[in-house]
Image (cartoon, helix red, strand yellow):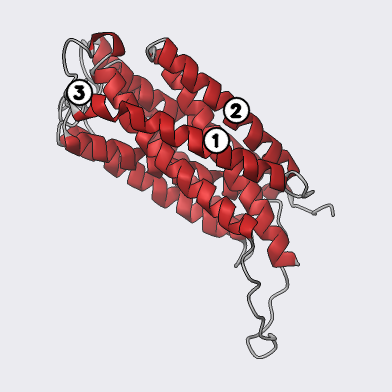
Amino acid sequence: MKISMSRGQRWFGHFAALLLGYVLFVIVFGAWVRITGSGAGCGNHWPSCQGVLVPRTPSQATLIEYSHRLSSGLLGVAALALPLWAFRSFSPGHATRRWSVWTLLLVAVEAAIGAGLVKNRLVADDASLARAVVVALHLVNTLLLTASAALTAMATRETLPRTRSRRDRAPRDPAPRSPIDWLSLGVLIGLGLVAASGAVTALGDTLFPVGTSLREGSEHFLVQLRVVHPILACALVVAALGLARLLADLPGTRPFALALGGLALLQLGLGAVNVLLRAPGWLQLGHLLIAQLLWLSAVLATRGLWLRRSQA
């Protein structure tokens, strides 16, 4: 069914889609800051850089970190505009309003985590357990952020059902969860765990390059944990392919299911190449981007599944 949208709603949909793309750019840029060891480029000052608004005679590390902060600041402005625009363009109860607010909140959490890393000096060459934990949480938050941004954009295509008073509503028994519902939920949780372990593994690859780990740092927990991520990833790919096969038969989820299956195989191949090439920086960035796209395909495929159930 074709959905009638106002001009403002259509422009909002374009803005939400562009915001999602920009979020992905900022996430990959943040990984580049880690790979280049530029996280301490502004010292432990935040939001200022080296105690000033604009650093003078900046080093390369300062330029990279400062540019990342500027891009993150622009994201914050865009995220603030998102719910303001959504509340003007969509009626109360519309899903776009809800997801736009979640996007803004998660951007704020993202900024707080980044500030915590800088203020506590959990950057550059720091190899502490605290940094590993925060980096893993940081990655999980980015997953939630990209999901909320994607769901904001997708919700612009939905129509708001006619609301009825509580007195007129007939009680409904919740439909029992099917195995495919539990599998989709398991894949989403599994992707979060794999992503978190991948963030820790990438941190170890940066601090203890694979070629030198046998000579130094071989006893460090970041080196010893390298084996965990590939094992979890292989198991997750099997589950994701199974979910994609089941969802491919459903009209509303087929495009995202095909993307889920294809990206899962691509990510598995990139992971293998990443290990063989000893985790070069450019490949880490590609691996991270595909991981985010794989997550989004799973989120949107699951969204299609749950929408079908709610309309049944």
Query: Which residue was labeled with disc 3?
Result: 40
Closer to the chain start, of discs 3 and 1, is 3
Residue depth check, mark 3 versus mark 2: number of the one nearer the observer: 2
The amino acid type of the residue labelled 1 equals: Val
Closer to the chain start, of discs 3 and 2, is 3
Callout 1 secondary element: helix
Determine the residue positioned at 60% across, 67% down: 93
Using the numbered discs, state the Cα–Cα distance from disc 3 to disc 2 in whole angstroms.
36 Å
Residue farthest along the bottom direction in this orientation: 167
Determine the residue positioned at 29% across, 26% down: 203
Determine the residue positioned at 58% across, 52% down: 183
Task: Name the quadrant containing residue 164.
Answer: bottom right
Q: Quadrant of the C terminus?
A: bottom right
Percent x, y for residue 297? 61, 40
Residue depth check, mark 3 versus mark 1: number of the one nearer the observer: 1
Query: Which residue was labeled with disc 1?
Result: 237
The amino acid type of the residue labelled 3 equals: Ala
Q: Which mark is residue 265?
A: 2
Callout 3 secondary element: loop
Percent x, y for residue 177? 61, 66
Task: Name the quadrant containing residue 150.
Answer: top right
Q: Quadrant of the N terminus?
A: bottom right
Q: Tell me: 196 left or right of 88.
A: left
Using the numbered discs, state the Cα–Cα distance from disc 2 to disc 1 in whole angstroms.
7 Å
User: How many numbered discs sit on the rendered protein?
Assistant: 3
Task: Name the quadrant containing residue 41.
Answer: top left
Q: Are marks 2 and 1 in contact (CB under 8 Å)?
A: yes
Q: Which mark is residue 11?
A: none
